[in-house]
Amino acid sequence: MLTRGLLHVLPCIAADICNSISESSFNQIRLMSAESMQRQSSEFTHPNLEVLLTEEQIRERVNELGAQITAEYAKGDVVVVAILKGSCVFLADLMRAIDLRMTIDFMAVSSYKDGTESTGDVEILKDLSNPIRGKDVIVVEDIIDTGHTLARLLEILGTRGANSIKLAAFLDKPEPRVRKEVKIDYCGFVIPNHFVVGYGLDAAGRYRNLPFIARVKNPAEA
Ligand code: IMP
Ligand code: MG
């Protein structure tokens, strides 16, 4: 009776052990493969990227710019106009480093390109929400390359009766500049003529979320 009972129970125990072993090793394999997949698919350590500016360098420089703006606009009442989408991360950090009475507004533009270079034909996709007449405006842009986009944008904003308009650009890439008259009043970093991503800047919409600036080694594969 006992033997028959044991015989009946043993396969169940054996099956339970087998199940729990196979379940735990399956979970382990699943965990390992999830980890290695995560490593393989990391955006932040993608092999096509080379870090140019670290988070620390960026934080320090943006805080300096904020302090400079705070000192230069002692009376406050500034309107910071950010150009979407690339300047969104720079704006978020810069505005928190400006200790002034201020408001923000946004513009979205699309610059027409001739091959890879912008032509200066700018279409306004989203205009400012409020008038800037009589205001002190700081335009915030991610990067000035040929300068076509900002030259046209500053022309457009220049017709709207602002008291002053200045330009803050996170990156200045002077080598390909065509519109030499574009003056950057507050510049984060001057960089060589590389295609860069991160900190809001993209390659076909990708990489805006990188907390640093990276050079794209092979832009064709970005
Ligand atoms: P520009 O009219 O040639 O000065 O072009 C300015 C715009 O081109 C910027 O606002 C960016 O959106 C884009 N751009 C220029 N260079 C880069 C780059 O290296 N990485 C990402 N976007 C760039
Ligand atoms: Mg842009």
Image (spheres, rainbow, N blue to C red):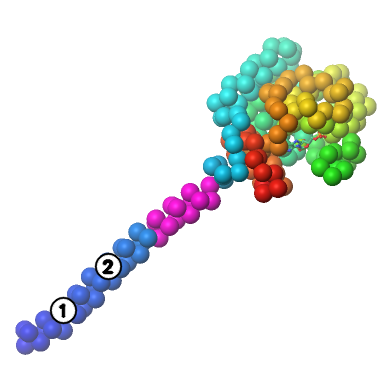
Q: In the shown orientation, is residue 158 left or right of residue 76?
A: right
Relative to residue 50, is residue 132 depicted above or below? above
Residue at 39% over, 56% down: 31
Q: In the shown orientation, is residue 186 left or right of residue 134?
A: left
Q: Amino acid at mark 2?
A: Ser
Reading the image, the residue beneath label 1 is 10
Q: Quadrant of residue 104?
A: top right
Q: Amino acid at mark 1?
A: Leu
Q: Position of residue 38 (x, y in %)?
A: 49, 51
Neighbor class of circle 1 (other Cα within 10 Å; few <14, some 14-19, many 20+) is few
Answer whether residue 77 is visible to the viewer in this image.
no
Mark 1 or mark 2: which comes first in sequence?
A: 1
Q: Position of residue 156 (x, y in %)?
A: 91, 31
Residue at 78% over, 27% down: 175
Please check the rendered image and state whether residue 138 is part of the magenta-colored stretch, yes or no: no
Reading the image, the residue beneath label 2 is 20
Relative to residue 129, is residue 39 depicted above or below? below
Neighbor class of circle 2 (other Cα within 10 Å; few <14, some 14-19, many 20+) is few
Q: Quadrant of residue 125?
A: top right
In the image, the segment drawn in magenta is: 30-42
**Real-space Cα distance between discs 1 and 2?**
15 Å
Label 2 residue SS: helix
Q: In the shown orientation, is residue 144 left or right of residue 219?
A: right
Q: Quarter of the picture for ligand 1?
A: top right
Quarter of the figure with the N terminus: bottom left
Please check the rendered image and state whether residue 31 is part of the magenta-colored stretch, yes or no: yes
Q: Position of residue 198 (x, y in %)?
A: 64, 37
Residue at 84% over, 34% down: 149
